Image (cartoon, grey):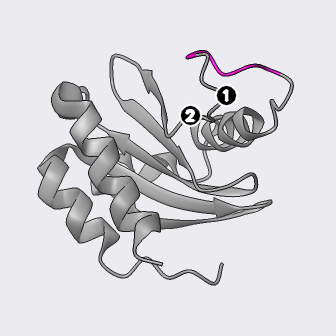
């Protein structure tokens, strides 16, 4: 991946604090961790991680599905909320993006969080 995400983890931590569980980026079939909190390190290489990556890529390939908001725009982010985590998928383009995994407490101000993170990840290019 040619784009480096120098201060992304620090910025995410400034928003999410200790609620930040993991951050990874992907392009095509490759992905890499930017951060993984110690207590969720066992998820690296796990079925959960593989499922999250597969579903994130699958979301990008659903070209025939009309956008749910009727505007014709692709989603800026998709969010899945579970009891133990919130998974935020931030697609960059049709082949790449980022996934942020948070404790559920971090989802309180989700709209602001998504806007700020997208700006840090992609708008500075």
Q: Is residue 58 visible?
A: yes
> What is the chief secondary structure element of the magenta stretch?
loop
In the displayed structure, 29 sits above or below 70; it is below
* Residue denoted by label 2: 75
Identify the residue at horizontal 33%, vertical 69% (top origin): 8
Q: Which residues are magenta?
A: 65-69
Q: Which mark is residue 72?
A: 1
Could you tell whether 16 is left or right of 29 in the image?
left
In the displayed structure, 28 sits above or below 64; it is below
- State the image coordinates of residue 54 (x, y, percent, origin top left): 73, 39
Residue nearest the observer in this picture, 69 or 13: 69
Q: How far separated are the C-alphas under marks 1 and 2?
A: 9 Å
Quadrant of res 64: top right
Identify the residue at horizontal 17%, vertical 26% (top origin): 108
Could you tell whether 20 is left or right of 69 in the image?
left
Could you tell whether 49 is left or right of 41 in the image?
right
Q: Are marks 1 and 2 in contact (CB under 8 Å)?
A: no
Quadrant assignment for the N terminus: bottom right
Could you tell whether 78 is left or right of 105 in the image?
right
Residue nearest the observer in this picture, 94 or 47: 94
- State the image coordinates of residue 57 (x, y, percent, origin top left): 73, 43
């Amino acid at each position: 991946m040619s784009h480096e995400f120098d201060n992304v983890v620090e910025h995410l931590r400034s928003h999410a604090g200790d609620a930040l569980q993991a951050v990874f980026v992907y392009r095509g079939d490759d992905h890499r961790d930017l951060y993984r909190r110690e207590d969720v390190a066992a998820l690296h290489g796990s079925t959960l991680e593989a499922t999250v990556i597969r579903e994130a890529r699958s979301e990008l390939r659903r070209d025939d599905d009309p956008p749910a908001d009727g505007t014709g725009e692709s989603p800026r982010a998709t969010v899945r909320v579970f009891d133990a985590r919130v998974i935020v998928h931030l697609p960059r383009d049709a082949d790449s993006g980022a996934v942020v995994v948070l404790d559920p407490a971090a989802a309180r101000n989700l709209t602001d969080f998504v806007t700020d993170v997208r700006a840090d990840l992609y708008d500075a290019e």
